[in-house]
Amino acid sequence: MSYREKENIVNIFSTLLITSVFAWKVYQKHLAGSIELNDNFQTWGIVFLIFAGVSIVARIVIYIIFHIINAIATREEDIPKEDERDKLIKLKATRNSHYTFSVGFFLAIIALAIGWPTYWLFILFVISGVISELIDNGSQMYYYRKGV
Amino acid sequence: MSKDFIRNNIRRLRFNADEMTQQELADRVGASRQTIVAIEKGKYSPSLELAFKIALTFEVPIGDVFSYEPENK
């Protein structure tokens, strides 16, 4: 398995881990009454900003750990440089990811239009964000395996 | 997804060039070894620039490295 494929597996794992842990923590706080998420847009904004920060830091930490473990296991310290095939694969995966998020965004708007509570807009944003991230990494793995 | 209709002779050319390894070819043309593997297997069609670099490495015309066969043949 190439470095890029392993990197994608780690990304899938970290996306699921970070989002589920953060969502669980926020939900527990909501149940405990320390934050109000039903129709408070400001709280949702704060939660999303904290999530962005936590997600970036956690991903950096997970990536460093992955690189160290990979370097020990394969005895290859250098990260393979990105060439034209890597860029093309990344581009196609990003396209697939954006299509997926667009569908999620559209579904969220439909949910608003048919009268679902406003918080569903944000929940559907999170779900479509996670799914589009998985599609991104899954697409990259597919193109690396099957060709592009 | 497969680009099988673009054939290449890279494996043979590497063998004739003192059994050049895929990594050596990759280093010379500025690509990764995985990309050379994908090209040899017909899973990736390189850009014109990379195709020319490969041809220049073996000092042969580009037509000796890559050939195109239309799908309906």
Image: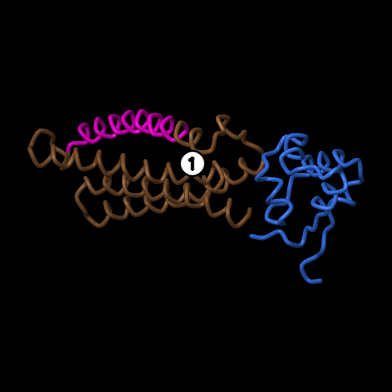
Chain colours: A brown, B blue
Quarter occupied by residue B21: top right
Q: Residue at the far left: name it.
A: A32
Q: Position of residue A114 (x, y in %)?
A: 25, 57
Indicate the position of residue B37 as horizontal and vertical percent values: 69, 49
Magenta: main secondary structure equals helix
Q: Which residue is drawn at the image coordinates 37% and 41% (left, top)?
A: A14
Q: Chain of mark 1?
A: A
Would you place residue B57 above or below residue A114 in this image? above
Q: Amino acid at mark 1?
A: Glu
Residue density around tag 1, few if under 14, some if 14–19, many if 20 or more, within 10 Å? some
Question: Who is closer to the viewer here, A131 or A8?
Answer: A8
Q: Which residues are magenta?
A: A40-67
Does the magenta segment cover residue B38? no
From the viewer's side, name the closer residue of B2 and A111. B2
Q: Farthest bottom residue?
A: B73
- In the displayed structure, does residue B48 sit left or right of residue A99? right
Residue in the foreground of this view, choosing between B22 and A121: B22
Count up the numbered dots: 1
**Residue A130: percent from left, percent from top:** 36, 46
Residue placed at 38% from the left, 29% from the top? A61
According to the picture, the residue beneath numbered tag 1 turns out to be A7
Q: Position of residue A58 (x, y in %)?
A: 34, 31
Q: Is residue A34 left or right of residue A143?
A: left
Q: Residue at x 20, y 33 (%)?
A: A43
Helix, strand or loop at mark 1: helix
Relative side of A18 to A143, left or right: left
Magenta region includes residue A48: yes
Q: Residue at x 34, y 54 (%)?
A: A107
Residue A4, quarter of picture? top right
